[in-house]
Image (cartoon, rainbow, N blue to C red):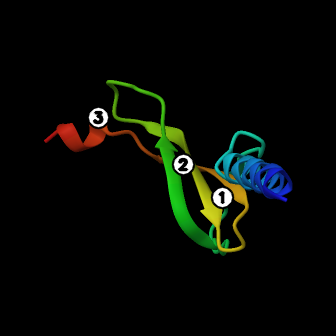
Amino acid sequence: MKTQTIVFATALASICWASIVNADDTRTSEAVPYHYGMVLHVAKVVALTEPSTMECKVITAEMKYIDTSGRPAQISYRKLSDACSLQS
């Protein structure tokens, strides 16, 4: 009886761990371009990335997030580069 319990608990823990690892993987989704008025259901922001530049210009940035249903998602959007905030 003890061996069956240990085997069952190990299998259950493995399944739970695999689902947690897959839930945090946002690389599986393609970045959807944002358009004005688009409704975003963001539960948790995972990462914000943008290309590095020393020029003040419009760039394409990306946000990886977990939506309110627990699925990973990714969106791209246009913004001014961080170099613009350094200029006076």
- Residue at image mark 3: 83
Q: Which mark is residue 34?
A: 1
Seen as rendered, the residue at the extreme left is 88
Badge 2: how crowded within 10 Å, few (<14), some, or many (20+)?
some
The type of residue carrying mark 2 is Arg
Q: Which mark is residue 78?
A: 2
Seen at 76% across and 47% down, the residue is 14
Q: In the structure shown, which secondary structural element does the residue marked by tag 1 occupy?
A: loop
What's the CA distance linking mark 3 and mark 1? 22 Å
Seen at 70% across and 55% down, the residue is 73
What percent of the width, then of the height, locates residue 76?
62, 48
Res 87 → quadrant: top left
What percent of the width, then of the height, locates residue 38?
67, 71
What's the CA distance linking mark 2 and mark 1? 8 Å
Badge 3: how crowded within 10 Å, few (<14), some, or many (20+)?
few
Q: Which mark is residue 73?
A: none
Asked whether 28 or 53 is in front, the reply is 28
Seen as rendered, the residue at the extreme front is 1
What percent of the width, then of the height, locates residue 47?
50, 46
Asked whether 19 or 27 is in front, the reply is 19
Taking the image as shown, residue 83 lies to the left or right of residue 28, namely left
